[in-house]
Amino acid sequence: MAGKITVPHVRSRKGGEKLAVVTAYDTPTARIADAAGVDMILVGDSLANVVLGYEDTLRVDMDVMVHHTAAVARAGTNALVIGDMPWMSYHVSIEDAVRNAGRFIREGGAGAVKLEGGRKRVPVVEAIIDAEIPVMGHLGLTPQSVHAMGGYKVQGKTSAAARELLADALALAEAGVFSMVLEGIPDLLAEMVTKEVPVPTIGIGAGNDTDGQVLVFHDVLGLNTGHLPKFVRQYANLYGVAVDALRHYVADVRSGGFPSDDESYHMGEQAAAELLGR
């Protein structure tokens, strides 16, 4: 789509053309994602483990997330930029949550925020929306709850758990979220949620019946070397391409092949003669 993607536009895509979403964490990755035509860019707290080398998403705070969100926003994308509220940025109090969400808009340049959790987060969601800040929900495998879940495990696998998640989704929709991520849940449950809620659902490890999909930028492009979840499809192996390119650079430096004469700056003949005392 040509032109800036807005929250109303995202809402209008419910049941229509699927929404393509990726993460990005800086200006170059945001520009690449936008050039490819993605609808939304999520500045995810996955920054912690994807870029900063931590084992989970719990290590990043508001200052880090706002810093990277601002870098993405400076790319001037058509895609809607969403700031991911980190762990403990909306858990202490409603006032704290609204203030932190506002930082993503004012300092980070985002157009919306995302937060994890179901019915117990409804008061927070409503308060942030009351401050005129659009909110994306996130249900299922919520990485900020990794310790409570006992690891990164598929959620909603029993009928009782599935009903609870559906109730959470309906509550978030009633609270006013403009869309919601469904992560790591059975495809049947994701299909049910998508049919029941009036806002777009964005799947990640949730089958093909959601209103859109989101993946991590580095996973899509093959920049990660570790274990990948089964739901990831790699569309390139840029890690291999990058290593090969840098090997050529190293070889050229060591052999004296770089830089060449054409890649060097030269002094005029008269200035050179004066410098050399001729």
Image: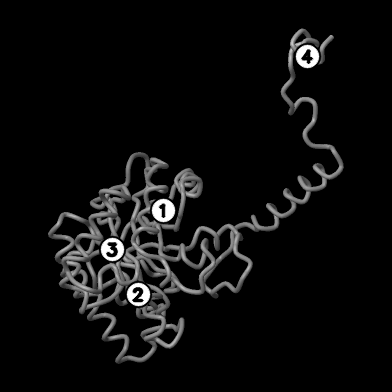
Q: Crowding near pointer 4: few (<14 within 10 Å), some, many (20+)?
A: few
Q: Crowding near pointer 2: few (<14 within 10 Å), some, many (20+)?
A: some
Q: CA distance from mark 1 to mark 2?
A: 33 Å
Of 84 and 175, the residue lying toward us: 84
Is the residue under label 4 in contact with that under label 2 (CB below 8 Å)?
no
Is 152 situated left or right of 221 in this image? Answer: left
Tell me where residue 221 appears, x and y as whole percent: 58, 57
- Mark closer to the observer (4, 3): 4
Q: Amino acid at mark 2?
A: Glu
Is 81 situated left or right of 270 in this image? Answer: left
Give the residue displayed 17% in from the left and 60% down from the top.
Answer: 129
Is the residue under label 2 in contact with that under label 1 (CB below 8 Å)?
no
| Residue sitting farthest toward the right | 255
Evaluate whether residue 18 shows in this view. no
Give the residue displayed 26% in from the left and 80% down from the top.
Answer: 166
Q: Amino acid at mark 3?
A: Met
Q: Quadrant of residue 62?
A: bottom left
Q: CA distance from mark 3 to mark 2?
A: 18 Å
Tell me where residue 10 appears, x and y as whole percent: 29, 54
Name the residue tied to disc 1: 68
Q: Secondary structure at mark 1?
A: helix
First-in-chain label (2 vs 4): 2
Give the residue displayed 82% in from the left and 12% down from the top.
Answer: 277
Name the residue tied to disc 3: 136
Q: Amino acid at mark 4?
A: Ala
